[in-house]
Amino acid sequence: MRAARLTDLAALSELSRLSHGEGGATSGRMRTLGLPVSSGHIGVFTLFRLPLGAFLPGDQLYVYEDDGHVTGLARVEHESIRDEFTIVELDAIDDGTAGDIRFRLVQHLLRDAAKRGGLRFHVACADEGGNVELFMQAGFARYGEERLLYRPPDQPYTEPLSPSDAAQSGIRAVEPLDAMELDRLYRAATPAPVVRLEDYRLPDWERQGNHWRVPRSALTPLLRFADVDAFVQASPKGPELLAFCQIGVAKADQPDYLRVISRPEHDPTDLIAFGLSAINEQIRRRRLDRARLHRSDRGVASAVRGYESPLDRRLAENGFSSLAVVSLLMREVAERVKEPALVPVGIR
């Protein structure tokens, strides 16, 4: 068990391809996170590839070497501001020892990342191949499920909304001053136990845009390879926010990204359409060709949590279809302490 070296890159790329390509994970020779399941449109290796240019100084890559051959791989991305680590890949050749190899890799990366000040460790995985059991054995808590959705590029083109049409629907770009209302929106759409686990603070909401990756989803690592923007839909009756949309326009050969949070009583159809049109508009600007309509050539990926229904139906109405259901797990290292607060006192 050791950190990866430059000389391992070819072997790691091959191991990753075998894990997520045709005949790899599905053949029984490999064990992976299964995020998402293999499909004709989109695969894990397509999403979370292994280029060194995508690595940041805090990211980690670990290998398991047996008899001079690399038989296991763990890849971890580090979010330095929140001291969070995300396990993106966990692969092993399944020759009867894959379960033990993967567990050792997880234990090693947890110990190593803890030395670097890691507070939370996240992973999303398919509930197959012993994935969930492995992480729970390593001290992770399972706190939700997400349905991964995909909108292929052959869906109808979404025309960009004019600024006046967007303003009429209350849609605009996120501003730092929206932090308080974004927090209230998130809490209205999210069960209290999940709110406590994810532990977003006002500074997290103030940093929207500029490659910021809150709120999380199983597809959060996609934002490492994308230009990120965020929008809100405000209530016409006051400062309350009705829905939030985060988009990531891919810089590499991978799907674009759309994440929506909405109040349960609100219909976010207009904001979803706006998010898709904003992706198309950014692609058009990037290609500097006003004579042609441009859309995402790799499609758009999204994620919806089980408690966010009927948001999944609104996305389906906009051309998204289901790819997979994955489990969300987290391990928290820091001990929680109660913050001091003022309470009312009766006077006699």
Image (cartoon, rainbow, N blue to C red):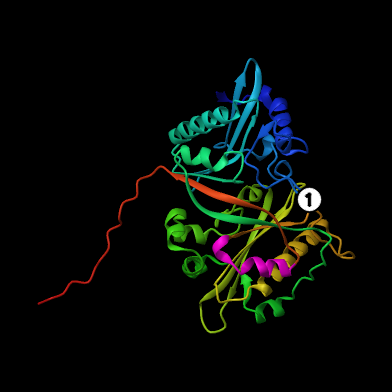
> Can residue 305 be spotted in the picture?
yes
Front residue of 49/22: it is 22
Secondary structure beneath label 1: loop
Does 183 appear above or below 213?
below
Please identify the residue farthest to the right as the structure is shown.
291
Viewed as shown, does residue 203 lie left or right of 289? left
Identify the image quadrant of residue 38: top right
Identify the image quadrant of residue 164: bottom right
Amino acid residing under circle 1: His
Span shown in magenta: 306-318
> Can residue 77 be spotted in the picture?
no
Question: x%, y% of residue 54?
Answer: 66, 40
Residue at 63% from the left image edge and 24% from the top image edge: 5
Please identify the residue farthest to the left as the structure is shown.
348
Question: x%, y% of residue 214?
Answer: 55, 56
Residue at 54% from the left image edge and 37% from the top image edge: 58
Front residue of 293/345: it is 345
What's the magenta bit mostly, secondary-structure-wise?
A: helix
Quadrant where the C terminus sits is bottom left
Within 10 Å of disc 1 (Cα), the crowding (few <14, some 14-19, many 20+) is some
Please identify the residue farthest to the top as the structure is shown.
67
Front residue of 225/46: it is 46
Viewed as shown, does residue 314 lie left or right of 103? right
Query: Magenta stretch containing residue 310, yes or no?
Result: yes
Residue carrying label 1: 41
Does 92 appear above or below 227?
above
Question: x%, y% of residue 215?
Answer: 55, 57
Viewed as shown, does residue 84 lie left or right of 211? left
Query: Magenta stretch containing residue 270, yes or no?
Result: no
Question: x%, y% of residue 343?
Answer: 24, 68
Quadrant where the N terminus sits is top right
Residue at 81% from the left image edge and 64% from the top image edge: 155
